[in-house]
Image (tube, coloured by chain):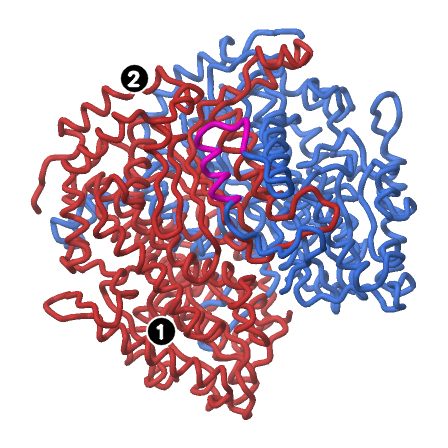
Chain colours: A blue, B red
């Protein structure tokens, strides 16, 4: 364990700390009046525009952040990531989600092997399998085409694919390709989620994709066994091989489960769950729904950002700038949260996905070398699409706590709508808000302005907006599969940049282990109490009390010896 | 403007401030070993169990909080709310959402009038209208029964009804009543949301409910006009009266829109949008989907908590305790956020609804008398259902920032599932996590424990959990309409308690106004630039730059003189 110095012990860190006071003396009202400053804070790449002029920064702040990046050896760490070094030290793994969307002729090594041919061999297999399902040459046990897919997975095997699916389903080209097909996800081990996921589906026309790297994830495997029962009780046990496939690396368990190992789609140790949407985890269900060619565009959008991130000088590097600005907001200005606000209903599931990517990656308390950190790392990410959020939590953002906001807008709508006689088309109406909110946050409204509008005295404090609330704006030209890939990669790399600067390991997740092991203990207790009336033992007073209240009620399951499936 | 002293100037506040150090010397490991303490922190009411023993509090903390409540005149404020006093001072309104679920023979005054008969006259009207639609005596323009409902509304006219709908749809009784029917919501002014909301629906069998108190909400009215066009272009203009109804108080605008004023369902000034789910806003669409008798149970669950909140001594008063503990966490311990974690997929939309109720109510920077506050108020609320969240942001909750968590569990599942041969049924598997996570957060795991498990040295810092992270657990016996009503009212009142103690107005929302007025300016610019090629004028450099990039692209609308509807 090489325990290098912490980043907070470096000069650039201390200089930035000292610089905070300079910034606090300013107001975004003044900063936004400086055109030169603003000009230098609007950049673009491959159709994406990033405007970070409404961050609480001076030009010197950016320079200071670049020095901090240098002290953190950011460039070196990015290079190591792309070259397959085992930067996930605690798990001794490479971090190569970028290889999942590399060009077919790219060369990326992990453990001395070029991984790109493996990636493409799985992609080719997905292409051919998904085409055979989509064109009806692969059929179910009763000879019917499989038009519906339930993808069973949790966390990284769920949120990323769900985000992309939600974004694609109103895209013209994608929705055309998906005609007559349905894709659903089953994540929660709650049987209510099982009921919801199969409501109205016919097992005869349904394909279940089980997504679990190890094929041991507790929730996913119980859900997979539940859907296996749903299929086999309707169509017989032999139907499972036709109606269930797997995304996993554990071929032995896949086969033991009853899935034909030829129908297992691999991924690799160097893909973290929350970074796996570009592996078979996302590519298989999405290709089944939309066809491989659409998904290929998604991959190429992500690749475009990978290349940009890897090769562009920091001054024009979108993920680097996004990451450094987040470090500034979180650690130097002390803002604990970030709101992700896409002005686009198709991006409804983007914030929940990034919430996972960011908070699981950077919610750490020790450095990569195991040193407890004297500064805060990962922020709380949350968000809803605009304009919905405006009628929900924006009150707090405008007049309560300061929460740096990401505004994401789309130039051309997936679904243009215009009503004759309206002043603007519906998308313009939406985008009026996208343009207005960042200025409302930055400028605010002074008591003097309210006086000049004849607002009654007693209301002035209530209608005053302090302003000086930071945000950034991202404008995408469209929301096609390609742009969705860009957006994903931009945020994935931003999170990595933050972690690289903080000096943490953004690619492990030891913090999820303890709850799992305690759940095992509870499960054993519930089993022994239900089956053998064993008393509750080994828990503290509070847990014992709640457990006994729980156990004393009916379960709704008449006899624990026969199978019960959902009734919706 | 009566500018009373701020609560932070009182003795109880100062005493609690001083008490923080006593608490910080403790660890939840010790606190949970004190059975007497824990016993005093588990209470129940009407089937609900609240366990707050895992809050970072001593018995004296609770006593101190009760003194704070006294200093804040909490009891008096609660009484004023229930008795219809105009406690929403800045808008000069009563706050009577509790009246929406009062018993038919209750008497509650606002402005000298008993409002209960008005409430019940609307409920009776909803009952009769929804029955006529459900039984096919009210039909569409082509004589077909209206089986599908699109409810158009935003913010409070959307999130509450969506939460209740999502919670009911897998309940056995409710789903049985909803057979053959579909309920959707359209909130976002994004035309993508319009496309999504009508995809696959036939105007002939669709009823549109337009929900807007003033009938002027920009998003809702444009969406309503868009759906009016969708209906009238398919069925003729005269079909609108048969296919559209309104929840509004502005009868004039309702009629002008083309809706029969007899089909307008009223609500009142004393109902805030975010507290309106028990008015026609929620009751009408939910009754259309599930039948009035189910919705009546929902109202009676809320009423049960109203009575409990109004009449129970604070020691056993669930909303009061929840509210005071939140004040403790936010203001005294300095935790800026709260995670709402229902171990129940049916409660998927509970956190987004409470995010609105809480953040819009308490995201304020001045006291009710207009004095700028020297302490933080409303917290950031976010959450996802467990176990999904465990595979997403729980890493941060366990090893990053401290975020007080609400764990919500259900004793008996809406959809019991058991597979022969499994150690536990699926709901027990889910609930194993509900019981395990609070203890994982509270107890953590020490380096010593890891050493005894032979964890390699270099991993010990990464696998250590500091513990001492507060949470509370709420256990509901079932998730029926009744319990959903209980849960809603519990959280509504908790938010009010917080606001009453902080001395703010939890019932206004001036912070949403500025963005609206700036959006108007952008809309005008987009109109004049699109129709008359007017140059961009009156915006700062950054906004002008982005606006010009936006305007220079195609809109996807060939000519701005003819109507374009979504194509999905």
Q: Please say if B499 is above or below B348.
A: above
Alpha-carbon span between mark 1 and mark 2: 52 Å
Q: Position of residue A144 (x, y in %)?
A: 86, 69
Residue A549 forms part of the magenta stretch: yes
- Image mark for residue B70: none
Q: Relative to B420, is A508 on the left or the right?
A: left
Q: Position of residue A64 (x, y in %)?
A: 49, 19
Along the line of sight, the residue nearer the viewer: B491 or B301: B301
Q: Residues within 10 Å of mark 1 (few under 14, many from 20)?
A: many
| Element under disc 2 | helix
| Element under disc 1 | strand
Can you tell which quarter of the image residue B436 is in?
top right
- Image mark for residue B21: 2
Q: Main secondary structure of the magenta part?
A: helix
Residue pictured at 47% horizontal, 37% vertical: A338
Q: Position of residue B465 (x, y in %)?
A: 54, 21
């Amino acid at each position: 364990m090489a325990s290098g110095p912490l980043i907070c012990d470096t000069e650039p860190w201390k200089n930035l700390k000292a610089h905070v006071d300079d910034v606090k003396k300013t107001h975004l009202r003044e900063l936004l009046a400086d055109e030169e400053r603003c000009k230098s804070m609007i950049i673009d790449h491959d159709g994406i525009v990033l405007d970070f002029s409404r961050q609480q920064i001076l030009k010197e702040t950016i320079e200071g952040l670049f020095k901090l990046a240098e002290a953190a050896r950011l460039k070196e760490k990015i290079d190591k990531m792309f070259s397959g070094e085992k930067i996930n030290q605690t798990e001794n793994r490479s971090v190569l989600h970028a290889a999942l969307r590399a060009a077919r002729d790219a060369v990326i090594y992990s453990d001395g092997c070029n991984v790109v041919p493996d990636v493409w061999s799985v992609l080719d297999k997905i292409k051919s399998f998904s085409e055979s399902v989509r064109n009806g040459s692969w059929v179910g046990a009763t000879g019917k085409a499989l038009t519906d897919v339930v993808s069973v997975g949790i966390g990284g095997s769920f949120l990323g694919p769900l985000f992309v699916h939600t974004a694609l389903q109103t895209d013209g080209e994608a929705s055309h390709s998906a005609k007559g097909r349905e894709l659903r996800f089953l994540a929660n081990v709650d049987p209510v989620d099982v009921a919801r996921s199969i409501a109205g589906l016919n097992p005869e026309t349904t394909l279940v994709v089980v997504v679990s790297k190890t094929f041991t994830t507790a929730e996913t495997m119980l859900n997979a066994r539940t859907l296996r029962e749903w299929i086999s009780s309707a169509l017989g046990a032999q139907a499972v091989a036709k109606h269930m496939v797997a995304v996993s690396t554990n071929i032995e368990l896949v086969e033991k489960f009853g899935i034909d190992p030829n129908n297992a789609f691999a991924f690799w140790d160097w893909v973290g769950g929350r970074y796996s949407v570009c592996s078979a985890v996302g590519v298989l269900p999405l290709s089944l729904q939309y066809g491989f060619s659409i998904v290929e565009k998604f991959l190429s959008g992500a690749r475009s950002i990978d290349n940009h991130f890897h090769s562009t000088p920091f001054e024009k590097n979108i993920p680097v700038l996004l990451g450094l600005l987040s470090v500034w907001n979180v650690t130097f200005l002390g803002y604990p949260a970030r709101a992700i606000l896409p002005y686009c209903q198709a991006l409804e599931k983007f914030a929940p996905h990034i919430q996972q990517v960011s908070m699981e990656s950077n919610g750490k308390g020790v450095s990569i070398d195991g040193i407890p950190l004297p500064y805060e790392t990962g922020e709380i990410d949350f968000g809803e699409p605009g304009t919905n959020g405006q009628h929900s939590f924006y009150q707090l953002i405008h007049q309560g706590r300061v929460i740096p906001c990401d505004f994401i807008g789309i130039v051309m709508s997936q679904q243009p709508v215009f009503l004759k006689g309206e002043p603007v088309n519906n998308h313009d109406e939406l985008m009026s808000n996208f343009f207005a909110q960042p200025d409302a946050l930055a400028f605010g409204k002074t008591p003097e302005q309210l006086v000049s509008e004849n607002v009654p005295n007693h209301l002035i404090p209530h209608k005053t907006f302090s302003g000086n609330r930071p945000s950034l704006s991202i404008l995408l030209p469209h929301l096609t599969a390609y742009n969705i890939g860009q957006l994903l990669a931009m945020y994935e790399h931003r999170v990595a940049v933050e972690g690289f600067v903080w000096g943490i390991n953004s690619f492990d997740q030891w913090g999820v282990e303890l709850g799992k092991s305690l759940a095992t203990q509870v499960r054993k207790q519930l089993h022994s109490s239900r089956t053998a009336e064993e008393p509750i033992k080994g828990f503290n007073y509070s847990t014992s009390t709640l457990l006994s209240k729980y156990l004393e009620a009916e379960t709704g399951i008449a006899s624990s010896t026969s199978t019960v499936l959902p009734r919706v």
